Image (cartoon, rainbow, N blue to C red):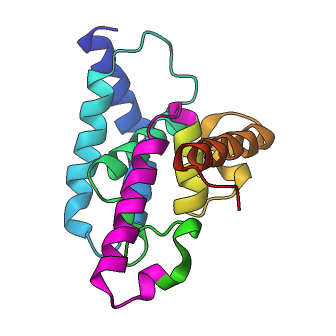
Amino acid sequence: MNVPESRSLADAIARDHGRSLRRFVAARLRGAKHAIDDVVQEVYLRIIRRREQETVRNPEAYVIQVAAHTLHDMGHAKAHTDGGPVRLASDGPEAWASEDPVAQADAQRRVEQAEQILQELPPRVYASFLLYRVHGMNHEKIARLHGVHPNTVKNDIKQAVGHLTRRLGREPA
């Protein structure tokens, strides 16, 4: 895809889904309102720079997926919970509640390791996992965003959990 085609896609997305994008980003950046414009701009830049040749079947799902990746890459994935860190069930509440800086640093290291492992997944699987486990969306809503059946979303999430479990060398919870 050349740059003019990418720009026309970005223009169409801005026109047709710009409000949805801003709402999605704003909902995840509670307490960081100043960053909304930066994230939205980065989403549009990523859409313009995309190299894929295939047609975008569901532009709204595509823009939300790009936004989820952008938020994650820019370090804002944590912002959806009143500025607190993203907590994985495997870390357990004791690591996050601890006053011990060593326990907190270890928990943060495990989260960062998990985030790197999850980025190895196909984009839809990665986005489905983040939307479900981090952002609290249900299977049906994620399925609508991606233009797939809810069972596909369930399988994507299972795939992500299985991949994470295998790579971390832990038994599934």
What residue lies at 22% left-to-right and 54% top-to-bottom?
37
Seen in the picture, residue 94 relative to 37 is either above or below; the reply is below
Verify whether residue 16 appears in magenta. no
Q: Is residue 26 visible?
A: no
User: Which residue lies most toward the bottom here?
Assistant: 99
Residue in the foreground of this view, choosing between 166 and 3: 166
What residue lies at 61% left-to-right and 49% top-to-bottom?
165
Q: How many marks?
A: 0
Which quadrant would the N terminus be assigned to in this image?
top left
Seen in the picture, residue 121 relative to 68 is either above or below; the reply is above
Quadrant in which residue 162 is drawn:
top right
Seen in the picture, residue 154 relative to 77 is either above or below; the reply is above
Magenta residues: mostly which secondary structure? Answer: helix
Which quadrant would the C terminus be assigned to in this image?
bottom right
Residue 4 in percent (x, y) is at 25, 13
Looking at the image, residue 164 sits to the left or right of residue 172; the answer is: left
Seen in the picture, residue 1 relative to 106 is either above or below; the reply is above
What residue lies at 33% left-to-right and 28% top-to-bottom?
47
What residue lies at 52% left-to-right and 52% top-to-bottom?
130
Residue in the foreground of this view, choosing between 145 and 102: 102
Looking at the image, residue 5 sits to the left or right of residue 141; the answer is: left
Residue in the foreground of this view, choosing between 50 and 155: 155
Magenta highlight range = 95-124
Residue 76 in percent (x, y) is at 31, 59
